[in-house]
Every structure is written in C-alpha cells, then in structure tokens.
C-alpha cells in the first residue's frame, strides 16, 4: 500500500506553532506530506523552508480550495486557528479527505456546529480525529501510579499554563483535561455545575470547577489555568489526589513524568498521537470503517458549556 498523501492547513509556527513538528511526525510515521497552505506567498516560502530543514518537501499554496483541487490527497491535517476550523473541515469533507484537526474542533461560542461536522464525516465513512495529546501520557503515568483510574474516579485536578488571556485561557486549554477525563473513564462524558474563580482576566489565575458525568460516577474537577514566563511551561494533573507532573528537559526536548521522588521517561505525546492517528488512517484506507467521533462531539459540547459559562460570569 502506498503511503497516505497528506496536506497540512496552517503549516507555520504561528500561534500554536505545531506545523513543522506535525509534518516531521507525519513523515516519521510513514505518510507522504505533499502539500501545505499558509495565508500568503511570503509565508508559503517561510513554511516551505522550515519543512525542508526537517526533510519534508511539499508544494505550498495560499488557498486550501486550490490545494484540494490540484492535489490528490488522502487526508488533511488542520492546524489553522480555531475560528477557521469549521470551513476547513467542510472543504476537507467535500473533497472526501480524512482529517486530523487541532483542538478545539470548532471555535466555541461562535455558532459553529460540531455535531453537524461529526455526522457528515461519519456518514461519508471518513476518519475524523482531534489533536488532543494528553491521553498519550497515561501509560507512563500508570507506571508511576499503577492504581490511576483503576478504582472510582472521585476527583480530578489539572494545572496548565496556556499563552492566551481571558476567555482564551479556557478555549485553548480545556480540551486537555476533558480528553484526559474521557480516557480515564472510557466515556464521552458531560459536564454540570460549572463555575469559575478568577483573580485577573488577563494575567492571573483562573480556576474552573465542574462535575464530569460518566456511567455510575460523578467526578469533581478543578482545573487551574495561569500565565507564566517559565519555559517549558509547567503542567500537571492529579487523580484522587495522586499528582503527576510533566517535565520537559533540554537539550533534546525530552519528556518525563514525576510523582514524588520517582521519574519516568515519556515519549513525546505529539509524536505518539500522530503515529496512532496514522495507524487509524491506514486501517481506514484499507477498508475498515472508522468509528463515529462521539468523544470529539461530546468534548465540543462540554467546551461550549465551559466557554459560555465563563463568558456569562466574566463578560
């Protein structure tokens, strides 16, 4: 079977900064990144040069529509800002392309309809996945805390340091705890009793409180979001009080998890996530129908609730 032909929408290191790294991991996973888009001719050259340094030679475009028209693509990876995701997903679906989309799937509180998109892809037998990487660290976390998620999940906590401000803190970060909760419970889930504490909408501490519903249990959740100048940015999560901290070490940008005085290595979750999506893509292209993206739909619904509640209480 020939390598899957991939196009990347938003291939630069702007905003999320993932373009070159996703292209690198796609090539490492055995796909053929043949095309990409950016917003203008100057950024096409910039992105093309960055990809070339990673060994990826691809044709650049300033229009997704033109790229889809001129390239026979199997799949599209959407890394553009979230306000452009809905239209990009529609273009990919119209072209019959499978998709990996950066989180969030659609811009919350914008009127974008995630359920419609999930239905479209499922109805056409097209794979739809979202780039939520945190579940890929759970194997390493369970090496540190073997009981994590085995018993009832009574309490979940997470600390993250997104670069956004105000509502952007919630929009850009909350897919991470939601995807972890879905993986820990093995259920799409729902959120209720949402509330926020906030000390400073631009630079300060934002705390989200909510209950996550899954079959037979209610998990009390607290997610702390704050801005920091520290690089790499700190992050951690805790299950029933057992905290695991993410550590990124230079040189080499290697990932580790720590719990108390114990430390274990962890594969780069982006690389792992891309590899697993590529396996799903290969299976789909070989004739295995993909599952409906129910978890992504539920995550979009929960994120909509969180962002809307934040907007109502903090303007």
Image (cartoon, rainbow, N blue to C red):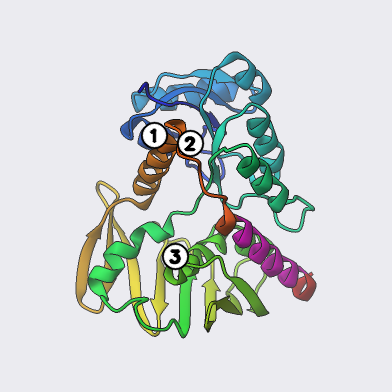
- 1 vs 231, nearest the viewer: 1
The tag earlier along the polypeptide, 2 or 1, is 2
Sequence-wise, which precedes: disc 1 or disc 3? Answer: 1
Q: How many marks?
A: 3
Q: Residues within 10 Å of mark 1 (few under 14, many from 20)?
A: many
Residue 314 magenta-drawn?
no
Which numbered marker is on residue 26?
1
What secondary structure is found at the residue carrying circle 3?
A: helix
Q: Is residue 251 above or below residue 36?
A: below
Query: Which dot, 1 or 3, sits closer to the camera?
Result: 3
- Give the image quarter of residue 306: bottom right
Identify residue for label 2.
19
Is residue 165 in sight in this rendering?
Answer: no
Image location of residue 10, percent across then percent down? 57, 34
Vertical order, 18 against 51 (above or below) = below
Quadrant of the snapshot with the C terminus: bottom right
Q: CA distance from mark 2 to mark 1?
A: 11 Å
Q: Is residue 262 above or below residue 73?
A: below
Instruction: Give the SS element for disc 2.
Output: helix
Regarding mark 1 in the picture, which secondary structure is present there?
A: helix
Instruction: Please tell me in which quadrant of the rendered image residue 205 appears.
Output: bottom right
Q: Which residues are magenta?
A: 297-311
Q: Residue at x 46, y 66 (%)?
A: 180
Q: CA distance from mark 2 to mark 3?
A: 26 Å
Label 2 CA crowd tier, 10 Å (few <14, some 14–19, many 20+): many
Asked if the stretch drawn in magenta spans residue 308, the answer is yes
Q: Is residue 98 visible?
A: yes
Q: In the image, what residue occupies the spot 69% across and 36% down? A: 90
* Residue at image mark 3: 183
Image coordinates of residue 211 in percent, x first then y, are 59, 80
């Amino acid at each position: 079977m020939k390598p899957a032909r991939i196009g990347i929408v938003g291939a630069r290191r702007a905003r999320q900064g993932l373009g070159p790294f996703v292209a690198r991991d796609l090539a490492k996973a055995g796909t053929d990144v043949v095309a990409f888009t950016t917003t203008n001719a100057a950024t096409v050259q910039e992105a093309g040069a960055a990809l070339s340094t990673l060994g990826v030679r691809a044709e650049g475009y300033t229009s997704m529509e033109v790229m889809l028209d001129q390239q026979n693509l199997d799949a599209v990876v959407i890394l553009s800002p979230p306000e452009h995701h809905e239209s990009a997903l529609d273009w990919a679906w119209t072209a019959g392309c499978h998709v990996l989309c950066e989180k969030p799937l659609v811009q919350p509180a914008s009127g974008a309809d995630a359920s419609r998109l999930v239905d479209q892809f499922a109805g056409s037998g097209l794979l739809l996945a979202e780039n939520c990487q945190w579940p890929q660290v759970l194997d390493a976390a369970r090496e540190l805390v073997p009981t994590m998620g085995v018993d009832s999940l009574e309490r979940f906590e997470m600390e993250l340091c997104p670069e956004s401000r105000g509502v952007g803190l919630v929009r850009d970060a909350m897919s991470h705890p939601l995807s972890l909760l879905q993986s820990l419970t093995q259920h799409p889930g729902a959120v209720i009793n949402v509330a926020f504490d906030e000390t400073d909408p631009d630079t300060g501490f934002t705390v989200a409180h909510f209950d996550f519903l899954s079959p037979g249990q209610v998990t009390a959740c607290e997610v702390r979001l704050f801005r920091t100048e520290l690089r790499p940015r700190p992050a951690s999560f805790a299950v029933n009080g057992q905290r695991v901290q993410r550590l990124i070490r230079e040189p080499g940008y290697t990932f580790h998890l720590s719990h108390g005085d114990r430390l274990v290595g962890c594969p780069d979750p982006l690389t792992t996530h891309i590899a697993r999506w590529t396996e799903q893509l290969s299976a789909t292209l070989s004739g295995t129908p993909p599952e409906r993206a129910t978890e992504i739909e539920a995550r979009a619904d929960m994120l909509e609730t969180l962002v809307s509640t934040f907007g109502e209480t903090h303007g």
